Image (cartoon, rainbow, N blue to C red):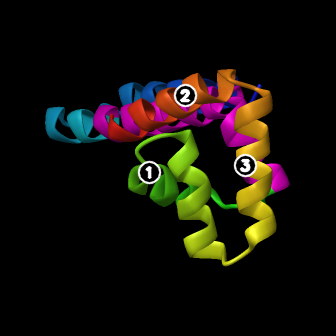
Amino acid sequence: MQHLEEVNSSLQVYLESVVKGVSPEESETIISEQQKRLDFSRKMYDLKGNHLYAFLSSEIDLSLDAIIKLISKSDNAYKLADVVYEVTNRKSDKERIERMVQRFPRLLNDFDKLKKEMET
C-alpha cells in the first residue's frame, strides 16, 4: 500500500509540473528526483518481504541503516551473526541469528538477496 501511495505522489508531482509548464531542465530534475524516490520505495517494499530483514529489524531491533552496514560487512549469513555481535555486543543476538540460520536455510538466500539489493 505504501508503495502505491509513493507512485501516486510521484504522478501528482509529474502532473503538477506539466500543468505549470516547467522548463526542460526543471522537468529532468523532477523526473530524476521522483525516480529515485520510487526506486527507494520499491526497495523498501522488497525488503519488507525478506525474512532475514524482517527478523533483523523486528526481533534484533536494528535500523535500516544498521542492517545495511552489517550486511555490507558480512560475507554470508553465518558471518552476519559475528558482525552483529561485534556491533551490538549482545551475545544473545548472535546466538539467535545463528539458530535462525540453522533452522531456516532459506535465510541464506535472503542474505544473498539483501546483499545484492544493497549493492544496487
Check if residue 64 falls in the magenta segment.
no
Label 3: which secondary element: helix
Magenta segment, which residues?
Answer: 31-59
Distance from disc 3 to disc 1, alpha carbons, whole Å, reads: 13 Å
- Residue type at mark 3 is Ile
Image coordinates of residue 63 in percent, x first then y, are 66, 61
Q: How many marks?
A: 3
Label 2: which secondary element: helix
Image coordinates of residue 10 in percent, x first then y, are 51, 31
- Residue type at mark 1 is Ser
Relative side of 64 to 112, left or right: right
Q: Which residue is mark 2?
A: 42
The answer to whether marks 1 and 2 mark residues whose Cβ atoms lie closer than 8 Å is no
**Label 3: how many residues lie within 10 Å, few (<14), some (14-19) or many (20+)?**
many
- Residue type at mark 2 is Arg
Mark nearer the viewer, 1 or 2: 1
Q: Which residue is mark 3?
A: 97
Relative side of 81 to 97, left or right: left
Q: Which residue is mark 1?
A: 74
Sooner in the amino-acid sequence: mark 1 or mark 2: 2
Mark nearer the viewer, 2 or 3: 3
Secondary structure, magenta segment, majority class: helix
Residue name at image x 50 percent, y 57 percent: 70
Give whichever of 98, 72 is nearer the camera: 98
Query: Visible in this render: residue 13?
Result: no
Image coordinates of residue 99 in percent, x first then y, are 79, 43
Relative side of 28 to 17, left or right: left
Sooner in the amino-acid sequence: mark 2 or mark 3: 2
Distance from disc 1 to disc 2, alpha carbons, whole Å, reads: 24 Å
User: Which quadrant of the figure has residue 104?
Assistant: top right
Distance from disc 2 to disc 3, alpha carbons, whole Å, reads: 26 Å
